[in-house]
Image (spheres, rainbow, N blue to C red):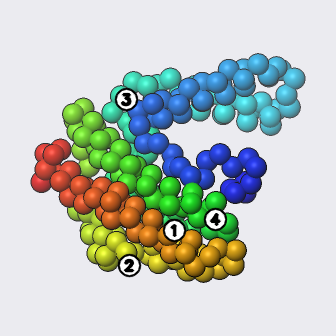
Amino acid sequence: LIDGGLLDHHSDRLTELSVARRDEDPARLEANLAMLRRFDRERLSPDDRLTHDVLEALLALAPEYRAFEWRSAAALYPVNPMDGVQTATPQFIASQHVVRTERSARHYVARLEALGRKIDQAIDEMRRQARAGVVPPPSILSASLAQVEGFVRPAAAEHALVTDFARALERLADLSPEDRAGLVAQARDRMSRSVYPAYQQLYSVPRAIGCD
């Protein structure tokens, strides 16, 4: 709701997929648990006590997550056919990043650059998990790579992330034709220079993690 507004400090980036980002989750849950325990349970109604106890039990599991060093900041497997970053992230950009102004258009281009980095991070995470003995089943890998094949099938300049962006720019009356062309050229560049190479690297992952 604040994209493009005064409080917009995020719409030119994507959430990192890293160990540091992963470790923020249990830290946040532990902070919430400490806050919950500051409430006087005895002053709550019976229904609220039940809610309190269920929430406390769930939040108390947070420290146990740290024991599983192989876990990812994304799903169990960062690349998977259900909600893997290879599909969820471009879908997020396409459906949630609304281009209303020149600024939001430039942020869209920045997010395309970030998409390539996020796929690189997913590959690093899969290799890290493999070193810990955690690898996706072959069926998950094959289904995910079929999605990757579909993603890179069109030429970078003809990908929907570029063509839909170009159509969105046509609706910005305050942009000159030269500015529109420049932004579309930047989007094509990010797709061909950052996004496609990262996606194509996914084909090497099964062999790298011993699942070819």
Q: Are marks 1 and 4 in contact (CB under 8 Å)?
A: yes
Numbered circle sitting on residue 158:
2
Given this view, does label 2 or label 4 mark the residue nearer the observer? 4
Relative side of 39 to 65, left or right: right
Q: Which residue lies under the disc numbered 3?
A: 68
Could you say where residue 1 lies in the image, as x and y percent from the top left?
73, 57
- Identify the mark nearer the N-term, 4 or 3: 3
Given this view, does label 3 or label 1 mark the residue nearer the observer? 1
Q: In the displayed structure, would residue 186 be above or below residue 9?
A: below
The amino acid type, in three-letter code, at marker 3 is Phe
Given this view, does label 1 or label 2 mark the residue nearer the observer? 1
Numbered circle sitting on residue 183:
1
**At numbered mark 3, what does the secondary structure look like: helix, strand or loop?**
loop
- Identify the mark nearer the N-term, 1 or 4: 4
The amino acid type, in three-letter code, at marker 4 is Glu
**At numbered mark 2, what does the secondary structure look like: helix, strand or loop?**
helix
